[in-house]
């Protein structure tokens, strides 16, 4: 798409660290940004045809939710209800297309929880109350259902090393699920067996590359310092590698795990910690990554996390209320300052928050599947978010103007510039970020809105005399690339001061001279009241009188007994300071005897 001039229909304004918030169902053509080339989500070299962002929403036929699995081969999405607890509860698995159309519902005899696909996507494994079911993903026909230990609380299922691993947790009452022991089992040669791994409370299982998987423990009364561990599942039994607990010696900082994801290259682990936010760890030893992600918006508690198939992007889901974003989609590289896209889900058409364990990407990154729920947790929605197919270029003009023409320390200064962009116009105004660099270092001035015609104004109040260099940045977002920074240097001078005098035309040596005056200084307020020098010049020469201190209201008075007749001149002056120019004023009085 060709560039037009600012204000043209094809221009798209962007701003540094722009956080565009979308109401689900009202997305426009500026949602995500990425270029889809081959099977990966990559940045385009040049503008191409733009695919409008969309958020297809399907209302799930559930009052509970337990699992989500994405079949990239057959382009189907499988979602399971939970309905745990009673042996009389049947289960459902809803099957959707990538466009959000429900094509089938699989009904099971007992409640279902936990879904996982084989590596070739030909088999769907389902955790049922007393069995591990498998289905053909093409025909949706049942293939097998080997028995498994009874589970009353809901299973986790993951396929690693060609076989399913799953959790089993039995209790007499649902209230005991939070602390009851969870066992990790597998299916070998058609039969279930215990792996020997178990612990109290819910255990989360998440697959990774190279036959690895994560096991994470939910925070519970019997586990005040939960763990996250990396396992090798390639052998007959799983072997634990790195493990970590997070609480300090005082018990603070314990993991409150809601979801986990492994980067496609296997080097990073992201955790959705409802207390700490999004944790980013190194997979080899589960140490903190050198650089982590910024905090979620204030009031948002992490609930879900997912890497895109090529590892370029991460989706961070949250539980939030009102206008606080529930979903952020941003570069997976925490060093990339590109601003995230923010989604707010609210209301009866959208849900209110992202459900725990409720997000997966398609393998090529072209779709993000996110399950939302309402505040009561008894309704669920499937959002299928499709990004556009390209990032567009942005340019910051190098021509600036500023006013006033002579910048003054301590007084407002406006620096004006322009921004141009390719591609469609954004849904909301974009912003640029500005800094001022002077002799005292670099100062962040914040963000400034770009108008529809591409113009923006940076507002500042420089507080130092000398050169001030303004740097304007546009850091980009997922729809537009960052722009090259531009700079503008302004010479900042001292603020003016002024003195005015009111004196009589004639006075006598007997009655004396009474002069009133006012003093004012522009720019930054003086740290102390100004002290003025007073000089008298007459026929006998020039002498200095007692200095006067300016009152709080800027006024002062001078009283003098002249020493000789005829013309006498009184000069009042102030030398100035580091931020203000000096000033002076004179008054002539004819003195009689």
Image (spheres, rainbow, N blue to C red):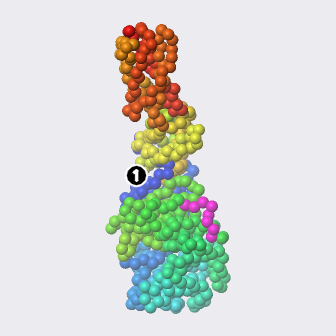
Magenta-colored stretch includes residue 192 = no
On screen, residue 237 above or below 472: below
Q: In this view of the protein, which residue sits in the foreground, 526 or 415?
A: 526
Above or below: residue 537 compared with residue 476:
above
Label 1 residue SS: loop
Query: Which quadrant of the structure image shows residue 198?
Result: bottom right
- Kindly identify the residue that appears in the image at 51 percent across and 69 percent down: 273
From the top left corner, tell me how far across and down residue 196 is, in percent: 61, 87
**Rendered residue at 51%/73% (across/down):** 256
- Residue 257 visible, this angle: yes
What span is in magenta? 286-293
Residue under label 1: 427
User: Can residue 10 be seen from the camera position used here?
Assistant: no
Taking the image as shown, residue 106 lies to the left or right of residue 466, namely: left
Q: How many marks?
A: 1
Which secondary structure class fits the magenta region best? loop
Q: Position of residue 434 (x, y in %)?
A: 51, 44
Nearest to the observer: residue 579 or residue 143 = 579
Circle 1 residues within 10 Å: few <14, some 14–19, many ≥20? some
**Quarter residue 307 falls in:** bottom right
* Residue 152 image point, x, y percent: 46, 87
Residue 420 x, y percent position in the rendering: 48, 42
Q: Is residue 402 above or below residue 255?
A: above
Q: Would residue 290 be counted in the magenta stretch?
A: yes
Instruction: Point out the residue furthest to the left here.
Output: 348
Q: Residue at x 62, y 72 (%)?
A: 209
Task: Tell me which residue sits at (66%, 81%) in the image.
Answer: 239
């Amino acid at each position: 798409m060709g560039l037009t001039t600012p204000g043209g229909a094809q221009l798209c304004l962007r701003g540094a660290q722009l956080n565009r918030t979308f109401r689900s169902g009202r997305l426009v053509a500026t949602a995500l940004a990425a270029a889809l080339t081959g099977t990966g989500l990559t940045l385009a070299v040049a503008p191409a045809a733009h695919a409008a962002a969309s958020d297809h929403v399907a209302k799930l036929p559930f009052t509970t939710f337990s699992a989500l699995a994405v079949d990239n081969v057959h382009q189907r999405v499988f979602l399971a209800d939970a309905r745990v607890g009673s042996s009389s509860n049947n289960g459902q698995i809803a099957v959707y297309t990538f466009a959000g159309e429900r094509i089938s519902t699989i009904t099971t005899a007992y409640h279902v929880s936990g879904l996982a696909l084989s590596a070739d996507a030909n088999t769907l494994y389902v955790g049922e109350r007393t069995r591990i079911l498998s289905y053909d993903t093409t025909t949706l026909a049942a293939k097998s259902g080997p028995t498994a230990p009874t589970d009353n609380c809901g299973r986790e299922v993951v396929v690693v090393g060609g076989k399913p691993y799953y959790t089993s947790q039995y209790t007499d009452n649902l209230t005991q699920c939070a602390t009851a022991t969870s066992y990790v089992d597998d299916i070998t040669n058609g039969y279930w067996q215990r792996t020997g791994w178990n612990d109290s409370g819910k255990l989360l299982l998440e697959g990774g590359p190279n036959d690895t998987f994560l096991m994470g423990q939910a925070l519970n009364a019997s586990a005040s310092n939960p763990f996250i561990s990396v396992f090798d599942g390639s052998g007959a039994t799983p072997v634990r590698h790195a493990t970590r607990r997070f609480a300090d010696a005082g018990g603070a900082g314990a993991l409150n795990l809601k979801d986990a994801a492994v980067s496609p290259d296997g080097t990073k682990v992201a955790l959705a910690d409802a207390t700490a936010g999004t944790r980013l760890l190194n997979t080899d030893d589960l140490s903190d990554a050198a650089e982590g992600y910024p905090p979620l918006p204030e009031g948002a508690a992490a609930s879900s996390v997912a890497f895109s198939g090529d590892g370029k992007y991460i989706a961070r889901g949250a539980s939030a209320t009102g206008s606080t974003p529930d979903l952020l989609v941003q570069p997976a590289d925490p060093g990339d300052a590109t601003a995230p896209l923010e989604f707010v889900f609210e209301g009866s058409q959208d849900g209110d928050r992202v459900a725990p364990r409720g997000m997966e990407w398609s393998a090529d990154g072209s779709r993000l599947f996110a399950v939302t729920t309402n505040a009561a947790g008894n309704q669920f929605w499937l959002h299928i978010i499709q990004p556009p197919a390209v990032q567009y270029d942005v340019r910051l003009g190098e021509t600036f103007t500023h006013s006033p023409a002579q910048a003054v320390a301590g007084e407002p200064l406006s620096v004006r510039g322009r921004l141009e962009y390719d591609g469609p116009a954004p849904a909301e105004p974009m912003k640029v970020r500005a800094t001022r660099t002077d002799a005292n270092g670099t100062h962040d001035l914040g963000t400034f809105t770009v108008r529809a015609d591409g113009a923006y104004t940076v507002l500042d109040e420089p507080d130092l005399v000398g050169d001030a260099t303004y740097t304007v940045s546009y850091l980009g977002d997922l729809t537009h690339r960052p722009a090259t920074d531009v700079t503008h240097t302004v010479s900042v001078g001292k603020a003016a001061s002024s003195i005015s005098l009111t004196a009589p035309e004639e006075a006598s040596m007997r009655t004396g001279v009474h002069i009133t005056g006012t003093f004012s200084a522009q720019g930054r307020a003086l740290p102390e009241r100004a002290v003025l020098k007073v000089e008298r010049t007459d026929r006998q020469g020039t002498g200095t009188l007692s200095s006067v201190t300016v009152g709080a209201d800027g006024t002062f008075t001078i009283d003098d007994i002249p020493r000789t007749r005829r013309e006498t001149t009184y000069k009042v002056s102030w030398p100035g300071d580091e931020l203000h120019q000096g000033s002076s004023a004179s008054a002539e009085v004819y003195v009689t005897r």
